[in-house]
Amino acid sequence: MSSINSNNPYGDSRQHHILSVMVQNRPGVLARVSGLFARRGYNIYSLAVAPSDDPNYSRITIVVDISATPLEQIVKQLFKLIDVVRITELDPRKSVERELMIATVRVDGERRGQISELANLFEAKVLAVGADAVTISIDGNPEKIDDFEELLRGYGIVESQRTGRVALPKLEREARKGATKGKAS
Amino acid sequence: MSTKETLTGAEALIRSLEMENVEIMFGLPGGCILPAYDPLLKSSIRHVLVRHEQGAGHMAQGYAHVTGRPGVAMVTSGPAATNMVTPLCDAFMDSIPMVCITGQVSTSAIGTDAFQECDTVGITRSVTKHNELVMRAEDIPMAVRQAFYIATTGRPGPVLIDMPKDVLQNTMTWHWPTDEEVVDSLPGYRPNVKGHPKMIKEAAKLILASEKPVLYLGGGVLKARAAEVVKELAELLQIPVVTTLMARGAFPDNHPLCYGMPGMHGTATAITAMQKSDLLIALGSRFDDRVTGKVNSFAQDAKIIHVDIDPAEQGKVRKPDVPIVGDCRQVVEELLKAIKELMAEGVSATDITPWRSRVNGWKEQFPLTYDMSGPGDKLKPQFCLEKLRDAAPEGTIVVSGVGQHQMWTSLFWEFNEPYTWVNSGGLGTMGFSVPAAIGAKAAKPERTVWAIDGDGCFQMTAQELVTATTEGIHVKIAILNNTYLGMVRQWQEMFYGERYSEVDLAGCPDFVKWAEAMGCVGIRVESVDEIDEAIALANSINDRSVVVEFRVEEFEKVFPMVPAGASNDEVLLHPNQESRREFLK
């Protein structure tokens, strides 16, 4: 399993943390940000960077597996970087997380149907079909992708690539318009 | 300016520096920075030509230390930039405002391993507050304005601007950004100077309620120009004060409330007062490991008020009970108001007379001490320092290198005025003192500047005395020559069973001849009866730099000492005082 939670390298109860860092969209910013982790010998588990809705700014989503105390210090030091405009730590329980994976799987004609069926179940898309392989794309929450990847493994993954995780806070229940159903009173 | 003016990037750079009121810069030209040195010929800025780029960096630091204004250094690419890494890191650790300009290969050659190319912004990224590779000539004025703004506001620090050669050669239309444009260009940089009123009130209450408070002053007090208001606070409630290595002079040593330096080589009184305190009022100090000793046994009963402009310092080492992010001067001004208001409302200050008399008792029992040398023995370094101190003209600025001589100077000198002590605290850069003294003297030509150096340190950067001579910046250097890397030797004696490994500098050069070769006056002092005359002579010479070599006792150790990793409760006193240890209770 490649999920950060199931494959905790520290073997303790550390939880993964998601940092959403809004930065000025300029050269060198990513190096400054990642340098603060590297300096302490921490690995960044996943990283996704793209311009935000305002092209002057980029949003960096960083997933790390660090206990809370050093992370608090890193967050403060990240915020000291001149190019960092805003940092939000997203609580995994209160966030929507998404990843995308594309994978090429070796299949002969006989088993192609099984793969196609599996793809349907997971709402994955078949992107390309070759004589003895198919390329599939799937997006969704990271656990779902873990599960799918695990099932594909049985067929033989030739190559696969997952994106870094992106995340946004879940909408507060109160903010969901008309969501009164199920409320006790 | 109404008409659009076309300038080369180099002209724009020099004009920008003039606009920032730079009066002096320290540097050494080379291939890629060549274009910038041409307009310098007709500039109002004085350029001090150094003999090694590291010297330019430390001179800029010395200038900044004593003026509070950013020191400026300009050097070329590649090896010059890498030689600048140490001063940048030093300035970063000690929060010294500094702007460094480096040349870079032309934009088209960047990344090709061109001659004298290095990834300067990459290399200096972690030792600067900010750095910038300027890719277009028209961006130069903004880059310079941002650099000065960032270097001098918030927690000060070094900023580097990397200037490719073609950017300096290309032309641009002159435009000087407004303050507003500078601030708008840095949306992620909004230093918080004003402390939170609720936290300040909370702090005021804690201070009034405390029975055993200590004001723990760090370098931030000096950076914030807060010495006056801090003194007012100390005097209002008669709170004992300790000044860290970076804060020496922030509170006068001759003040009855001053108990000197805390930390690994602090006074027994300062160390113990913090250990026994019930409230540490940390102002611009950062709970450095050299101050706290073993962290989990540091001032265990003390609540902490931590005032620092850098939010990342809050809770980094010790969780504060009252964190206040803000400029020390502004916060302490507000704190004084809050205390006075509470007192006006009828809250009375706790009587801390018993605490003060306890602290004074330690001060009486454990003064700084050393054994005087016997007849025919080598000089004691502490004795030389006392003599230098007592003969120093009013307002003398003292600069030190790193090691035993630094600790002795910090302990035995009496600093009664802010900005008269310049040293490398955080990074501990040997070789700091000669160039830093030159920078300090360039900033304050009317002051006497004494650099107190060790023989090891001196041999690292002494060549800058050639700069001092040619530039007419006359400093005085006292070398406490024990022919050892003294502090390392002390550790090998105390913690490695006297197994001395590579600390013997016995093959030391003839410092007098060396000084003379660099155009300085060289004086050697070997016995007690030569001291007064030598120091008087050194103080009387104002047209040349002077190097006084004191041949001192090799095996003298710095006391008190808290061994690395030990608790401050386990401070090793001077052997003469160990029998009185029980009085430290």
Image: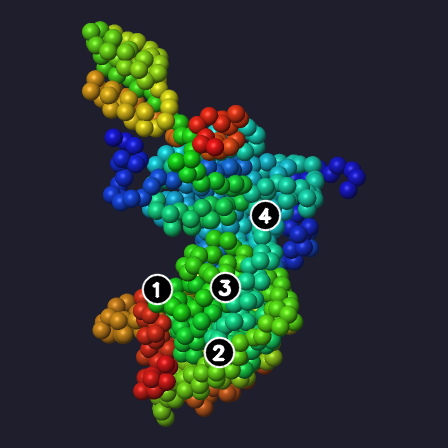
Question: Can you identify the residue that label 1 sits on?
Answer: B296
> Compared with residue B411, is residue B576 higher up or lower down, i.e. above or below?
below
Left or right of B209? Residue A39 is left
Residues tagged 2 and 3 counted as in contact (Cβ below 8 A):
no
Task: Provide residue B337's location: percent of width, then percent of height.
Answer: 64, 66
Q: Residues within 10 Å of mark 2 (few under 14, many from 20)?
A: many
Say which of B315 and A184 sits in front.
Answer: A184
Q: Chain of mark 2?
A: B
Residue at disc 4, secondary structure: loop
Q: Nearer the viewer, mark 4 or mark 3?
A: 3
Q: Nearer the viewer, mark 4 or mark 1?
A: 1
Q: Nearer the viewer, mark 2 or mark 3?
A: 3
Q: Nearer the viewer, mark 1 or mark 2?
A: 1
Task: Provide residue B531's location: percent of width, then percent of height.
Answer: 47, 86
Left or right of A106? Residue B356 is right
Residue at x-position 47% and y-position 69%: B279
**Mark 2 and mark 3, same subunit?**
yes
Residues tagged 2 and 4 counted as in contact (Cβ below 8 A):
no
Say which of B437 and A184 sits in front.
Answer: A184
Q: Locate the C terminus of chain B and report the quarter of the image it occupies.
A: bottom left
Question: Can you identify the residue that label 3 sits on?
Answer: B305
